Image (tube, helix red, strand yellow):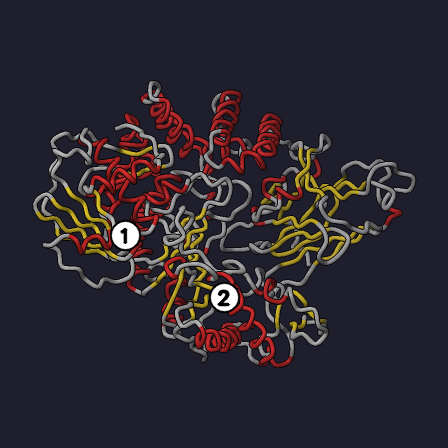
Amino acid sequence: MKKISLLFGCGLLSLAVSAGTVKFAPDASDAEKHAGSEFAVYYKKITGKSIYDKKNPLTVYIGKAARDAKWFTPKQGKTEQWFIESNGNELVITGDIRGTVWGVYEFLEKYMGCAFLAPDTEIVPSNPDWKLPQIKETFTPAIFRRALDMAQPRIYHQQILLHLKSSIRTRYPELWLHHGSPHGSHTAAAYVKPWKDKNAPFARRASGAVWESTYCSSSPEAVKRIAAQMCEYIEKDRKNVPPEKWRIIYDLSQNDGDDAFCHCPECTRKRGKNGSCSDLNNEFVNQVAEIVGKKYPDVLIQTFAYSQTLAAPEKVKVNPNVIIRFCNSTLLNPLRPGTPAAENFKKWHAMAQKFALWGYWKVYTGTVVTPYVIPRSSMQRELRFCRDYNVMFYYGENEMPYHRSFYTFQFYLGMHLMVDPDADVEKLTDTFFNGYFGKAAPVMKKYLEFLEKKILGLGDISKNAKFSNQYLDQAFFDQVNAWLDEAEKLTANDKRSNLHVRWERVPVDQTQLLNQDKIRVKDKQKTIRRYRETLTELYSTTSDSGWKKRGLKGFLTGLANDCDMFERMPFPIPEQFKDKKGLSDLHWPDFHPWGGATRCRVSDPDAASGSAFELRRDRKYTHKAPFAAILVHAYHRKDFSDVTFMLPKAKIPKDEKYHWYRIGATTMAPDVRVHCGPGTWDGIDIHLSKAVSGIVWPVKEVWISLKLTGPAYVDGSTKPNGIFVERVIAFEPEQQAK
């Protein structure tokens, strides 16, 4: 196995055309030409011979050039379908543009032994005696649009995504099935942004106030405006662009959040059970789709089955040119036969013809990512389910690659299973592990199987909000660290494989260091040093050069703060809270599962962890006493009333230091949080999901360590106005508080 360069120049392509041994049609697309030139490069690497050598009898027909192969009968294929056929020393790889390109990479993998594993690793065998086998293959990928998005940094560059047959972020628009304007999701706000007239059909809030960030879903005027705007977007996107590069998916979906729809009387009347807006949204999108479809019959209009529209509709089916983007596939509630998500999807399936799936490949349990994987069997079952129920598009929200267990393997396997859900998973596993982990492959495979067994052994984890902590005990870390120690020794002379092993230590080390009160860390200083060095190397060498310019410095600063916190841990429990039942001690990594740390976290030497959450400094606030906080439930508000806390200015400490305050007691449901700050929308949100105990939700008292600074809170202060929260403690009271 060896790593080869992935850079190709124009000269190779012109040579291929003039030599005639890799043949293209005169109107071949750039993507087809690139794939054909790559065929020639890999052929040379494998056989040691140039495909352009006049003594080489091999002739390869790419795409529409297949009509020049006199023995080949051209066929009208499906979208993305490829045809690979050989006759003597001639080879045809054809289909539509996408099918042709994917067929080239399929041939390199299946018939020449290449394997495209990760951004820094591919397998290119040496086989001087390779001969063209007799082939007659036809195949259509199971999922039409295939994407695993990694947020930032984007460690998968365009070339490896092309090799893995990804439908987004490749360099060629004719392959990149991206969404049309304005963007790919949560577009309601973008559609209403141009509305400036006072009679615009804006939504209404529950209070009756005008809501200018979304539209009224029962307004005929809103239908007309949005349909016209969508047609304008389509026209602009297609201007001076050839048809093969047209974007065909246009999104019309609600804004993010748990309250995204109009509350006017008519919209309220059209809501379904438990406030579901599925029928309301379907009816609105259908009307837009009908208008747009008359002008652009090839366009597909995408909308969400998400949050308030997740429940299957009761009455309104969607039009054939509407795609339902189903957003309920997680490790906690997987879209696999027999799960609640699957049962809901089946109900949706009776109400729509076309589907996309938005899967959550990252578990949102806080800033910290603990060791976990999507078990291979679960992944395969889900993608088979998608194929069997005609899911056209699969998108995996797949963030934080450097902090996830077996990230590159899961990416590799997921992309292959989207193409063929019946692929041999064990064979793909062995190919990847042998190439990626080198001599440590057998040991690392033991770890993968161990981790999968732990997760699968949890049973019905869809009902358990704290699943990720159940198997992370001392025995788990003792076993995993023993395997990782062995794997590091086995790869000591293999720099790349050794880095891959150390990468797998990141979530293991982080979880141990953050749980020093429960987990024994062997050689703490060495573990902290290894954690910092590995992440520094990974982030500093990422292929995402734009992110390195924008984000690397800030990341390294945050990493230094993290390691300083690890040095300080474990934190002693304040005397007043010792011996409390069911105590949960939360610090900044636990405060916000949706990335709030990037906006609110500040270094603070007064804080026990060295960091605290402060009101965002990129926004303007009107600070004024009294200080107010509220314990609130996002999704269960009708079941659990809000608990309010008020601190008058006269009772605010003059020392501008941290002090403990009892906010109140409430049921620890997974959606509970402390909101504190100047108003309903402005402030800090401290999510308390780490204090949730699982299926049974106990009542707990919630205390925060709070610091208020500046003249708005302390007369005569020369410090800037500020609200800081550095720690939260929750525990079960001796007597259940109301």
**Residue behind mark 2:** 235
| Picture coordinates of residue 296, whole percent (x, y) | 43, 71
| Picture coordinates of residue 418, whole percent (x, y) | 31, 53
**Residue behind mark 1:** 26
Q: Is residue 95 visible?
A: yes
Q: Are marks 1 and 2 in contact (CB under 8 Å)?
A: no
Quadrant location of the N terminus in the rendered image: top left
Quadrant in which residue 268 is drawn: bottom right
- Disc nearer the start of the sequence (1/2): 1
| Distance from Cα at disc 1 to Cα at disc 2 | 28 Å
Residue 398 sits above or below residue 631 on the image: above
Horizontally, residue 607 falls left or right of residue 258, namely right
Q: Residue furthest front?
A: 18
Q: Secondary structure at mark 1?
A: loop
Residue at image position (41%, 40%) is 156
Horizontally, residue 229 falls left or right of residue 167, namely right
Quadrant location of the C terminus in the rendered image: bottom right
- Of residues 81 and 619, the one drawn nearer to the viewer in this rendering: 81
- Of residues 352 and 467, the one drawn nearer to the viewer in this rendering: 352
Q: Residue furthest left?
A: 88
Residue at image position (39%, 69%) is 298
Residue 722 sits above or below residue 603 on the image: below
Residue at image position (25%, 57%) is 81
Q: How many marks can you see?
A: 2
Q: Residue furthest right?
A: 716
Indicate the amino acid at tag 1: Pro
Q: Secondary structure at mark 2?
A: helix
* Neighbours of disc 1 within 10 Å: few (<14), some (14-19), many (20+): few
Q: Residue furthest top?
A: 493
